[in-house]
Image: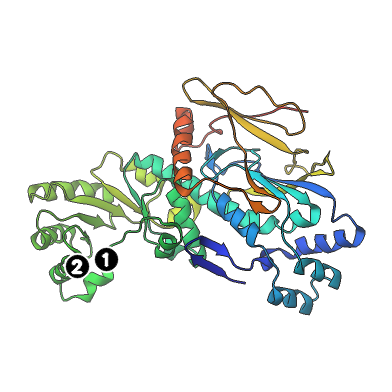
Amino acid sequence: MGVSVGASGLGPVSTGLLTDHYELTMLAAALADGTAARGCVFEVFTRRLPDGRRYGVVGGTARVVEAITAFRFGAAELAHLRDNSVVDDTTLAWLAEYRFGGDVDGYPEGELFFPGSPLLTVTGTFADAVILETVVLSILNHDSAIVSAAARMAGAANGRPIIEMGSRRTHEVAAIASARASYIAGFSTTSNLASGSAYGIPTSGTCAHAFTLLHDDERAAFAAQVSALGVDTTLLVDTYDITQGIATAVEVAGTGLGAIRIDSGDVGVLARQAREQLDALGATETRIVVSGDLDEYAIASLRAEPVDAYGVGTSVVTGSGAPTAGMVYKLVEVEGRPVAKRSSHKESRGGRKLALRRHKPTGTALEEVIYPAGGPAPELGEHDRLLQIPLMRGGQQVADLPTLEDSRNRVRKGLVSLPWEGLKLSAGEPAIPTVYLEQ
């Protein structure tokens, strides 16, 4: 099992062992008793948003489609299952020929979601669909958590650019997906070169404290960086004394210095002082970039300060306190018959469902309406919008799926559509209510 990072993106080469053991247990039992071929519908949804959140943003849909398309059990995976007696020979033979042949519909990347939203619908035989649970949820839960957190940060930045720089704070493969998810949410660049190569995301970066410490003094470090990268580079000025660092930076690069970066201390106060000092030195166009354990709350608190850009690491790649979107993958229909889980606090609603979002004439979202797929559809108003789109048909990806730029635009439009209360960072109810229409 491995991963490939190439021009087509980050995608599993052989993902069979991403299946959990219990999924193969169910598969083996279903093959044995003849129920594996029953037509089924599975849905992905979340019962609640993370504490304090008023909306979620879907991420990872395109990666899910890619993963399902590539989902295979190769010789090495089959040998592992056989040698460890995970499944019987009948199940091994079935897995050796596995290719998903069903349909997938879902919310496109960048779409807002709320409790109960039918984010992904997988239609196929029980066997076809049940073994996809782990790979689907691992991608959607991770990427949606990152996009949702990053969207809050981009909103707090109020148009100022944000650089994603969290690769050192997460798993090496998750770092690539996190950079992609952050870009969808509105971040301007990433420092992760693998994600830049895979997805065409703009990359940026500058020198760290180690480069300054390498040299005999700060002036020598700045001179070397400017000589190599030009005066439009960003100089890190807080390795020693920040006031002296700014003075030295301007002396070395001149008043046309591109930017300085502040990575420690009370960055709001320091940014104010830095702006005054830069202006006094004639470097009025030199930008100020701040970083260092920033999250959406810190970014919001800096809105009135003379900050031109932010660098965000740990908080974005960990979902800013919500590292999973809490999504589940549940069987909701068997051979056209609705089925539902009744366990306390873990209930599900039977039957395949569709969703639309109602809006005021001004474009403000009013409610998420979820209704049975098998019944009459509710009347679609002039400003209402259906939310699910086709993603796969007969095991094949549909043509013209949304691009990365389409997803970025969808996030922007979705956030603009929320009532102003829904954009608050303080804890509160979901920005719009979810309304269920019964059969």
Identify the amino acid type marked 2: Gln
246 relative to 148, above or below: below
Say left or right for 265 vs 409: left
**Residue 173 image offset from top left, x and y in percent:** 51, 65
Residue 359 is at least partly visible in this image:
yes
Say left or right for 206 vs 404: left
* Quadrant of image for the N terminus: bottom right
Judge the density around disc 2: few (<14), some (14-19), many (≥20) Cα neighbours within 10 Å.
many
Mark linked to residue 225? 2
* Label 1 residue SS: loop
Residue extending farthest front = 399
Report how far apart the C-alphas of labels 1 and 2 lie in the structure. 8 Å
Residue receiving disc 1: 207
Residue 317 is at least partly visible in this image:
no
Which residue is drawn at the image coordinates 67% and 58% (left, top)? 134
Identify the amino acid type marked 1: Cys
**Residue 72, located in which quarter of the rendered image?**
bottom right
- In contact (CB < 8 Å): disc 1 and disc 2: yes
Which residue is drawn at the image coordinates 79% and 47% (left, top)? 40
Which residue is drawn at the image coordinates 52% and 45% (left, top)? 402
**Residue 167 image offset from top left, x and y in percent:** 43, 63
Which residue is drawn at the image coordinates 26% and 52% (left, top)? 289
Residue extending farthest bottom = 83
272 relative to 96, above or below: above
Q: Earlier in the sequence, mark 1 or mark 2?
A: 1
Say left or right for 63 vs 234: right
